[in-house]
Amino acid sequence: MQKTKTRRTLATRRRGRKPCGWLVTDVTRLSDPLPAIARLKPGDGVLFRHYELTPSRRLALGLKVAALCQRRGLVLLVAGDLRLARRLKADGMHLPERLARRIAPGHGLLTLAAHDAGAVARAARAGANAVLVSPVFATASHPGVAGLGPVRFAALATAAARRGLVVYALGGMSEQHRRRLGGLPVAGYAAIGSLS
């Protein structure tokens, strides 16, 4: 019980407010994320991906993203690279499902991607604070891939909440779709298109 309470407290403190929107950066759909980041509200978050860039270009853009997040009062997570997260003084890390693993304490907020019940269980075992459950609805990021839909998403979100994980919805997060998730244990949402 104490572990669950600690996770929720940390996640709530770092989010700063509810609901929380996470802008997910993407080299194809949002090659220059800075204008979109500048429009976010204080307390929102940025999940910095841009995996496809060379390490030097990713660092250069990451430094700009980190400085803007600092100025705007935004939470910054770096996807998949602990060294870069440290260099950018990020608030934590996000791990894709394939990299689900425990990160040593002291590295801030840890979120993991979850596409099924097995991933939710692995996120809990890894000590994650939160999961980004996706894709909830069809999304331009993965053309031709069917979304989970509200019923399957609800089952995963409930399972994650029972394990003490904070849940964020990702995939096709239009205003209309967010309303369809009302009443579920969802702390917020993550998006590319609707936040950019």
Image (cartoon, rainbow, N blue to C red):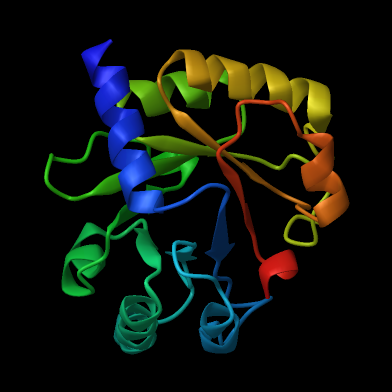
In the foreground, 100 or 151: 151
Determine which quarter of the picture holds residue 29. Answer: bottom right
Q: Position of residue 61 (x, y in %)?
A: 39, 86
Above or below, comparing residue 22 to residue 12 in the picture: below
Q: Which quadrant of the rendered structure holds the N terminus? A: top left
Q: Which quadrant of the rendered structure holds the C terminus? A: bottom right
* Residue 71 horizontal side relative to residue 163, left or right: left
Q: Position of residue 105 (x, y in %)?
A: 13, 39
Report whether residue 55 is seen.
Answer: yes
* Residue 170 horizontal side relative to residue 3, left or right: right
Residue shown at 32% from the left, 89% from the top: 60
Above or below, comparing residue 116 to residue 79 in the picture: above
Residue shown at 27% from the left, 59% from the top: 91
Report whether residue 110 is seen.
Answer: no
Residue shown at 55% from the left, 39% from the top: 187
Above or below, comparing residue 126 to residue 40 in the picture: above
Q: Position of residue 115 (x, y in %)?
A: 61, 33
Q: Position of residue 94 (x, y in %)?
A: 39, 51
